[in-house]
Image (cartoon, helix red, strand yellow):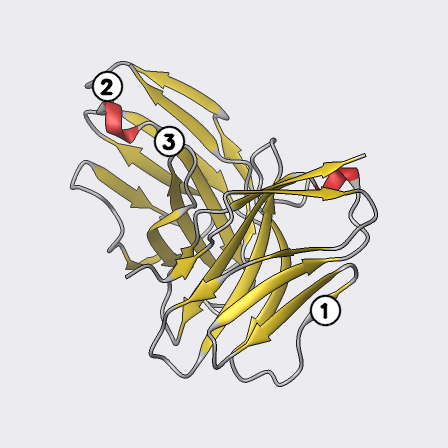
Amino acid sequence: GAGVSQSPRYKVAKRGQDVALRCDPISGHVSLFWYQQALGQGPEFLTYFQNEAQLDKSGLPSDRFFAERPEGSVSTLKIQRTQQEDSAVYLCASSYRDYTGEQFFGPGTRLTVL
Amino acid sequence: AQKITQTQPGMFVQEKEAVTLDCTYDTSDQSYGLFWYKQPSSGEMIFLIYQGSYDEQNATEGRYSLNFQKARKSANLVISASQLGDSAMYFCAMREGVGNQFYFGTGTSLTVIP
């Protein structure tokens, strides 16, 4: 399909495990965003890439969270030593232009930490 | 202070009727963008409509219109002729100035009654 895809769609991790969440943006989209959406809340910004450069990571909640986009396309959000409070839906969005463009969202990865 | 406030946790509307979902925002920037997204139970965020702070006309997209009142800092979404498929969560969001972040509200759950 032509939309943003994310994998896995669901992930269950034991507390303390590391997880990696993948985002495939729409081909040609320059900007890529990660959001965390807790149950019953709106998405909260985590980090932003323009091509391969991570221009803003101010929303990452701790140094256990790490994101990369080495070739300016696919991005991975990694969470080390997962905690129960990390349980949420992680949404990825991409935008054709820079941050001013409309964002197209993927279906999200629902992470549950036991 | 919250950047985006949505005061209606849940709304009901009769099929074929119009409904207004409220959104107020807080920013000191002169340049900003306001967005509405729909999130069905499948989880994907679907872009509905955009209003720029300098746009003089209210944005419209099919059955969606944005009632932009700049002095009151409100950006209410109006859905005309509601359909059963409109039942979903609706999020108001804002991008400030040249910032990278989108700020989302807590959402309004809309239920369309047949």
Residue B80 in the figure: left or right of residue A74: right
Q: Is residue A79 above or below residue B51?
A: above
Q: Is residue A19 above or below residue A5?
A: above
Q: For mark 2, what is the residue?
A: A17
Q: Residue furthest left?
A: A63
| Front of the two marks 1 and 2 | 1
For badge 1, the amino acid type reads Thr
Secondary structure beneath label 1: strand
Name the image quarter holding residue A38: top left
For the residues bearing labels 1 and 2, Cβ distance under 8 angstroms: no
Q: For mark 3, what is the residue?
A: A88
Picture coordinates of residue A16, whole percent (x, y):
19, 19
Q: Is residue A20 above or below residue B85?
A: above
For badge 2, the amino acid type reads Gln
Residue B111 visible (yes or no) = yes
Residue B67 in the figure: left or right of residue B79: left
Residue A21 in the figure: left or right of residue A83: right
Q: Observer-nearest residue: A50 or A11?
A: A11
Q: Could you say which disc has been placed on residue B23 in the image?
A: none
User: What residue is drawn where x is 44% and y is 27%?
Assistant: A110
The CA distance from mark 3 to mark 2 is 15 Å
User: What residue is drawn where x is 50% and y is 26%?
Assistant: A9
Q: Could you say which disc has been placed on residue B60 in the image?
A: 1
For badge 3, the amino acid type reads Ala
Name the image quarter holding residue B36: bottom right
> Looking at the picture, do discs 1 and 2 lie on one chain?
no
The CA distance from mark 1 to mark 3 is 33 Å
Indicate the chain on which mark 2 is placed: A
> Looking at the picture, do discs 1 and 3 lie on one chain?
no
Picture coordinates of residue B50, whole percent (x, y):
60, 67
User: What residue is drawn where x is 66% and y is 76%?
Assistant: B58
The CA distance from mark 1 to mark 2 is 47 Å
